[in-house]
Image (spheres, rainbow, N blue to C red):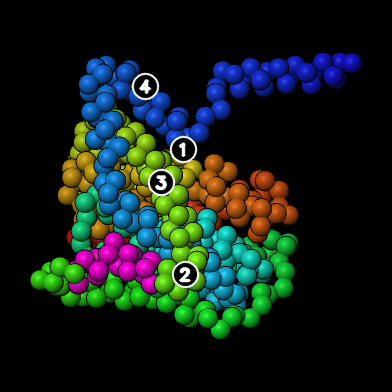
Amino acid sequence: MGLGRMENSKIVVKKAAICFFPDLPILIWMILITLFIGIFAGFDAKQIISTFNSGWGYAAGEFALILLPSFILAAAIRKQQIIIPEAVSVSLAPVVSAGMICPDTAYAALAPMVRKHQISLAVGTYAGFKLLFPAGPLIIATSLGVTDSVIWLYSLGVFVPVWIVSLVYARIIETNFVSNALDSAPLASSNVLATLSPFVLLVILLAVGAGFDLSRNSLADFFTNPKGALLVSAAIALLMVPHHQRRACVDSGVRWTGSLLLIIGAASAFSAFVTVVIPIEDIFGPQSGILALGSLFAMTAVFKLLQGSSMSTFAAAGPVAVPIVAASNLSPILAVLAVCLGSFVAILPNDSFYWLIRRSALAEESELRAMMILGVGSVLQAFIGLALLFGIHTFFMS
């Protein structure tokens, strides 16, 4: 009887907690918290609405030009249902993740073809999304207003060592700690290279845009810009899908883009209020060089730990970073990469990517063990990249 009463009391307490804290989507919580910040800061109604509007619309058009073609490209690749050897899947993971603008989608698409090295796949998709065009660096560059076309080369230079170190870490984990390694995946289908050709085209267009001044020809200039190159790659991928499936790919891209634009808008509005209420320039004004890079890294890491979602972190951290960069006389390219590296910290249970890996690669591990494996791996990636960034600043930017 006593045990039954205890269980009933726990249920009552749980229901009371649910009643006190309504079960609302994160989008609604962000909007409510943003509005309360304005109210408690003493803003009048006109200030609250105007600040919310300007924050919500911050770079919204540019984000749409990045996300919509990326998700259409991802949907078109998924429709073709290619089968790739395990080693090739792990090698392509960063590029696929960056092209899809989503580590979750890339991991979910490639994981069925990988059995022995799913942790290697996970760290590759995570690093690719954070450090390769057209994902993290382009999103943050858009927020900071950075237009330097060579930024993708710097991001690639930081990505390669980070990826190599994280692969070594993953292989150590897979060999010594993870107990669910299975047989290798089947051989590749014959259309792998053709299916992945939109990604190759994307890289070629970006390289041409970085290497040549095409501003005299508006069409060539736009299509070698990251956003224009994405549109071309998405169109090519769509043409490779059977005619009757193309509309479904476009609809999928529109749905994913619409939902993410809502989250990005809410996160940007939140950042707009934070930057108005908190004197960011005063806090970070005297900083420069390595200290400013560390501040950007730490600020983004805090956002990531609080929000979990990488995309929400990018949306929230970008506008907050603007006054820090302006006050620090820091290289905009290094500032972008510092924010990208801060967003690595860390893969925890408040991140959907954690649960995707947890249910596949780490299904047999305890919760604490899974958190340690993914948390340590993502933090290692972050600090290897930060060390490289400090080195670049010290030896090449000073």
Of badges 2 and 1, the one in the foreground is 2
Cα distance in 3D space between marks 3 and 1? 23 Å
Cα distance in 3D space between marks 2 and 4? 49 Å
Q: Give residue 306's mark.
A: 1
Disc 1 crowd, CA 10 A, few/some/many (<14, 14-19, 20+)? few
**Residue 348 quadrant:** top right
Q: Which residue is mark 2?
A: 243
User: Quick check: can you spot residue 146?
Assistant: yes
Dot 1 or dot 4: first in sequence order is 4
For the magenta stretch, what is the residue range?
Answer: 220-236
Mark 4 is on which residue type?
Phe
Q: Residue at x 66, y 20 (%)?
A: 15
Q: Which residue is mark 3?
A: 258
Between 37 and 75, the residue placed more toward the observer is 75
Mark 3, secondary structure of its residue: helix
Mark 1 is on which residue type?
Leu
Give the residue furthest to the left: 216
Give the residue furthest to the right: 1
